[in-house]
Amino acid sequence: MRVWVNGHEWAKRQLRRKGIGYQELQNGFFACDDPIALQKVCDDFSAEDVDAFFRRWLRRLPHPFTAADRQAGMRYQLSILQMEVSLTQVFDRTLHGRQFFEEVIRDNLDVGRPDRVQLLFQRRISRRTPGRFRTRVLTAGVQPSLRFDYKHTRVKQYFKLDKALRTETTFNDTYDFEIGRNLGNLPHLRRLGRHINHRLLTLERVAQHCAIASQTVERIVLPTVDDGQRAPAQRWGDPRIMALFSALCAFSAAPEGITNRSLRQRAGSLFDAGPKGYTQARMSYDLRRLRLKGLLLRLPHSQRYVLTSLGRRVALFMSKSFARIVRPVLQRLDPSLPDQAPDPLRRAWRVCERALDAAISEARMAA
């Protein structure tokens, strides 16, 4: 026997009983007169509510147990076959929500890779871990969705009805997380699902809001001295430094920390370090620089590091600004490119160059 209980519909009935007004969003909520009360209703949903729903129907439907069987203690016991934990975040304007979600897709195409998945689910992934680790961007009509998996667990994110960002974690086998199927484990699974949803959104928000102050940029790209310890500059645009920043982005929420080996492997794949490769000694030197700049924090009594809040923002800002602005813009301004397809940016740049040349000539400072 299978029993399906829709938590959203259950919550809507509780609100109606309490006389609290709301606007529904299909399988969710668009607005509510008392959001705090709504959250409490959702938190109060328990295994006992599911069991009571089931027992109420058992009194109306025929089943094999006779009255004598029930008096002898024979009864059905529910287990969790599938459970979905969702989060719906409503935007003030459709345009804002769509822009944000399009950027989310663009920045998180690698979220399904094993190293990223194990950060979100806080589970170690090895060659023996079952499942296909990939990111899928599926389009139904004009509505794209971002999806990735861990074993039998599915995570889906999409822009719901042009109004809200919907994040869903669906457990299809509770043993993926060493949790039994007993209905009493519902609160534990709910906390786990909420944790996964919020962890994903935290990673996405950090990627969207990574701007840093000019003083911070100067501190990173110029040499500094703190407490008598000199920290060399992290030159923005240097291939080795940019590979290092890009590698750090993958560890933006690593619960187990960063090691010399883990960071060296990722940075080495992004930077040609020569015949000797990215050596352990070279990475030790880079880790020290990052720590003195305040980007990394060494965990006590260990050889592991974690990114500071400043480190996350710096790594994302340096990587995104170089990869999305500087490098493509300089390629567009390359004077060796043909003019068969005029670029508005190139035309504006040449007008600026001519105006600057004229100003220099008028000042009689030309070479």
Image (cartoon, rainbow, N blue to C red):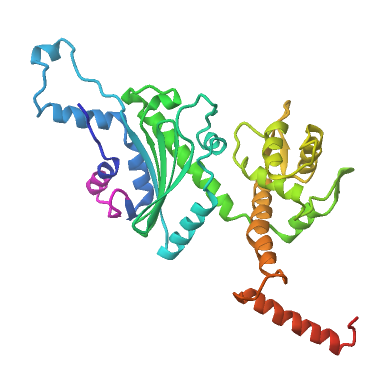
Q: Which quadrant, please, contains the C terminus?
A: bottom right
Whole-percent x, y for residue 202 in the image: 53, 46
Identity of the residue drawn at 72% across and 80% down: 352
> In the rendered view, does 248 fall on the left or right side of 152?
right
Identity of the residue drawn at 10% across and 28% down: 61
Q: In this view, does 322 lie above or below 200?
A: below
Quarter of the view holding residue 60: top left
The answer to whether any part of residue 65 appears in the image is yes
Identity of the residue drawn at 24% across and 28% down: 51
Whole-percent x, y for residue 117 in the image: 52, 37
Whole-percent x, y for residue 90 in the image: 40, 56
Region in magenta: 12-28
Along the line of sight, the residue nearer the viewer: 346 or 309 = 346
Q: Which quadrant, please, contains the N terminus?
A: top left
Q: In this view, does 363 lie above or below 334?
A: below
Whole-percent x, y for residue 71 in the image: 13, 12
